């Protein structure tokens, strides 16, 4: 769903017509509220906000799975270093 010109509302207009805007949003619209001509906040339905948050969590989980898969590939290919050895090398570099 795209944003059209009628979905961009000045802050003063939003304040004066908040009930009407809320009804439009509940019916499926999304509104961008501007302040001094620049985007300020968005007005969206609470169910849609919950959906956006669930998509964000799912995206984070997919990224974690991808990173875990890369780590397993590194282990399988032998591209790993024992943590104690890596820490010892770092400490040695600091002293030198």
Image (cartoon, rainbow, N blue to C red):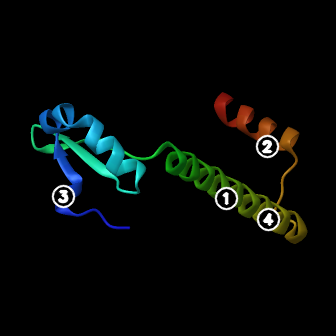
Distance between the Cα atoms at labels 4 and 3?
46 Å
Task: Using the image as rendered, state which of residue 19 and residue 79 is in the foreground.
Answer: 19
Binning the other alpha carbons within 10 Å of mark 4 as few (below 14), some (14 to 19) or many (20 upward) gives few
Q: Nearer the viewer, mark 1 or mark 2?
A: 1
Pointer 3 or 1: first along the chain: 3
Q: Residue at x 28, y 62 (%)?
A: 3
Binning the other alpha carbons within 10 Å of mark 3 as few (below 14), some (14 to 19) or many (20 upward) gives few
| Left or right position of 11 against 58 | left
| Left or right position of 20 against 52 | left
Pointer 4 or 1: first along the chain: 1
Q: Which residue is mark 1?
A: 63
Distance between the Cα atoms at labels 2 and 4?
22 Å
Q: Which residue is mark 4?
A: 69
Pointer 2 or 3: first along the chain: 3
Distance between the Cα atoms at labels 2 and 3?
58 Å
Please say if 83 is above or below 69.
above
Residue 15 falls in image quadrant: top left
Q: Nearer the viewer, mark 3 or mark 1?
A: 3
Q: Residue at x 85, y 63 (%)?
A: 72
Q: Which residue is mark 2?
A: 86
Please say if 94 is above or below 4.
above
Pointer 1 or 2: first along the chain: 1
Q: Which residue is mark 3?
A: 6
């Amino acid at each position: 769903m795209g944003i059209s010109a009628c979905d961009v509302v000045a802050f003063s207009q939003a304040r004066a017509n908040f009930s009407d805007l809320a009804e439009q949003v509940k019916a499926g619209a999304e509104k961008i509220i501007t302040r001094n001509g620049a985007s300020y906040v968005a007005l969206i339905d609470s169910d849609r906000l919950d959906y956006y948050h669930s998509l964000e969590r799912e995206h984070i989980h997919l990224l974690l799975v991808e990173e875990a898969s890369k780590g397993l590939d590194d282990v399988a290919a032998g591209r790993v270093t024992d943590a104690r050895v890596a820490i010892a090398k770092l400490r040695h570099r600091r002293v030198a």
